[in-house]
Amino acid sequence: SQKIEQNSEALNIQEGKTATLTCNYTNYSPAYLQWYRQDPGRGPVFLLLIRENEKEKRKERLKVTFDTTLKQSLFHITASQPADSATYLCAPQDNNNDMRFGAGTRLTVKP
Amino acid sequence: ETGVTQSPTHLIKTRGQQVTLRCSSQSGHNTVSWYQQALGQGPQFIFQYYREEENGRGNFPPRFSGLQFPNYSSELNVNALELDDSALYLCASRPRTSGAGELFFGEGSRLTVL
């Protein structure tokens, strides 16, 4: 069955450092992979989308990589700030009509 | 342009009751999806509607049903509520049903089943 695994439930880092979050998937052949941010009690908010033929995508302090051989995506936040503290969700998307999410990684950036 | 809105924001029901949750999708979006998110978990896909027809379903029993209306708003109905149905129910819309495209989420309806 299809599985989406995000590296850890929680990640704590110091302000200014780079946070790296991992998303692994099995029994999937996603054409796209999306990352979302979710704050407590709120709906997820879209951050980035990367296509299967793109190795890397950047947006301001965010960088996403997509390795279809390893079946893995890495999500980086550089120069992290306490305001980046949230849960980050990955969502591989194949050409079916639905999108499924990983369990998320809760990031805490300490001042 | 208004975003995705959901109602009610919170509600409490007892086991065996039925509930209807409502979603108004973002203007111009013809596809709506519903997700269940238990505490500490990621959103679990329930189903998706496109032009009033269900066109994708996750691993949820038939007591979870839905509707999409001509104005693309949507309802999620859950019958015979169980304690495990307690969760945040999220509605998300997007402008087309297939291909790349971000989901726009509402803030959710928090359901507690006692």
Image (spheres, rainbow, N blue to C red):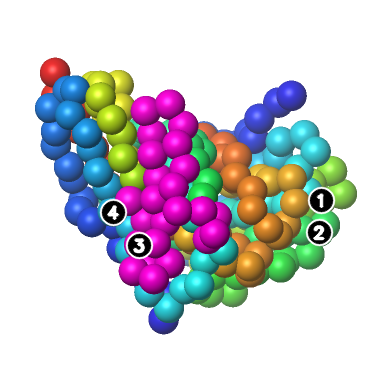
Pointer 3 residue: A72
The residue most toward the top is A111
Q: In this view, does B90 lie to the left or right of B85?
A: right
State the image coordinates of residue B109 (x, y, percent, origin top left): 51, 41
Report, in whole angstroms, how far the alpha carbon at label 4 lies from the one at label 2: 36 Å
Name the element at disc 3.
strand
Quarter of the picture holding the N terminus of chain B: top right
Near-viewer residue (B90 or B80):
B90
Residue A77 location, quadrant: top left
Q: Are marks 2 and 3 in contact (CB under 8 Å)?
A: no
Q: Is residue B73 visible?
A: no
The label number, if any, that marks residue B69 in the structure image = 1
Q: Which chain carries label 4?
A: A
Crowd around label 1: few <14 · some 14–19 · many ≥20 (10 Å): some
Near-viewer residue (A2 or A70):
A70
Let me know if residue A54 is in the magenta part: yes
The residue most toward the bottom is A1
